[in-house]
Amino acid sequence: MRYVKQATRNTPEIAINLIKGEIELRGRSSPENSQKFYAPLLRALQSDKMNATHVNVDVCLEYFNTSSSKCLYDIFRQLKRMKKCGTAINVNWYYEAHDEDMLEAGEDYDDIVQLDFKFIEHQNEYL
């Protein structure tokens, strides 16, 4: 099962492949209702269809607002639960070169949920 929500000016692209255990978030995240926007992703992670033994998460956000930050935290907490149940979790946190704030945000999530993020600097404005 594959789910793709195209990016808009205020929302990131979300691509989920439940069979392969792949999740991608790319773009800007400042939706009017973050909980509603991220609900399909949280439901997918909690679904019994997400039965991959390994989940790879690519996060390449150029910006996220406060309400998106809470939703990202909820997503990472669900991934932590999955890890405790035996699923291998790999989080790649992409940040633009010289964007210290985005790097620090990823490091903060890593410290809080302890999922062993991999931090990847890139030169492109948007991957």
Image (spheres, rainbow, N blue to C red):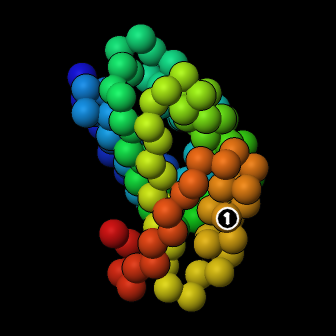
Q: Position of residue 118 (x, y in %)?
A: 49, 63
Residue located at (44% from left, 37% from top): 88
Q: Taking 102 as reference, is 36 above or below it?
A: above
- Residue 96 placement (x, y as % from top left): 48, 79
Residue drawn 38% across the image and 21% down it: 50
Query: Quick check: can you spot residue 4?
Result: yes
| Residue at (63, 62) in percent of width and height | 106
Left or right of 31 on screen, residue 47? left
- Please identify the quarter of the rendering in which residue 32 is found: top right
Callout 1 secondary element: helix
Task: Establish if 79 lies above or below 26.
Answer: above
Residue type indicated by callout 1: Glu
Mark 1, Cα crowd under 10 Å, few <14 / some 14-19 / many 20+, is some
> Where's the N terminus, which quadrant?
top left
Residue 97 versus residue 6 in the image, above or below: below
Residue 92 lies in quadrant: bottom left
Q: Tell which residue pokes out farthest to the bottom in this image.
A: 98
Image coordinates for residue 84, horizontal then vertical, percent: 59, 28
**Can you identify the residue that label 1 sits on?**
107
Percent across and percent down for residue 98 are 56, 88
Compared to residue 83, the image places residue 124 above or below, namely below
Quarter containing the C terminus: bottom left
Residue 12 vs residue 18, the one in the foreground = 18
